[in-house]
Image (spheres, grey):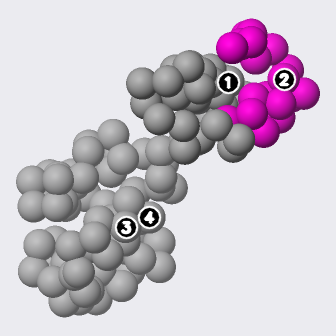
Amino acid sequence: MNIKVIKNENDYQKALERLEVIFDAPIDSTEGDEAEILSILIEKYEDEHYPIGPPDPIEAIKFRMEQMDMNKSDLAKIIGYKSRVSEIFSRKRKLSLQMIRKLHEKLKIPYESLIADY
């Protein structure tokens, strides 16, 4: 096992290539341990160099609706009229504090996602 810190893009690519080779190694093996350590190093490098920001509120709502197999009518029952849902999705209307509270309560969308700028 020859593991080193990922310091640059070249190291990152080499780590990805090695992980691909040993990915299916048994957990209780030397290669399994190496795969676990490489995964941690790769994740750390990606978090620092390729951060993924939170989704905007509208995308968070759409994603959660898809997960819950909801349609716009279902959402209208939570936040108000169908026309209001259309205005929000077309970004003509901002979410009100009351809507944010209801979305958090009913759909379990984190407040941080709902109050972000969009």
Q: Earlier in the sequence, mark 1 or mark 2?
A: 2
The answer to whether one can see residue 12 in this image is yes
SS type, badge 2: helix
SS type, badge 3: helix
Q: Amino acid at mark 4?
A: Glu
Q: Amino acid at mark 3?
A: Phe
**On residue 63, which mark appears?**
3
**On residue 83, which mark appears?**
none
| Quarter-of-image position of residue 12 | top right
Q: Residues within 10 Å of mark 4 (few under 14, many from 20)?
A: some
Q: Earlier in the sequence, mark 1 or mark 3?
A: 1
Q: Which residue is mark 2?
A: 11
Label pair 1/2, CB-CB below 8 angstroms: yes
The Cα atoms of the two marked residues, 1 and 2, are separated by 10 Å
Q: Earlier in the sequence, mark 3 or mark 2?
A: 2
Q: Nearer the viewer, mark 3 or mark 4?
A: 3
The Cα atoms of the two marked residues, 1 and 4, are separated by 26 Å
The Cα atoms of the two marked residues, 1 and 3, are separated by 27 Å
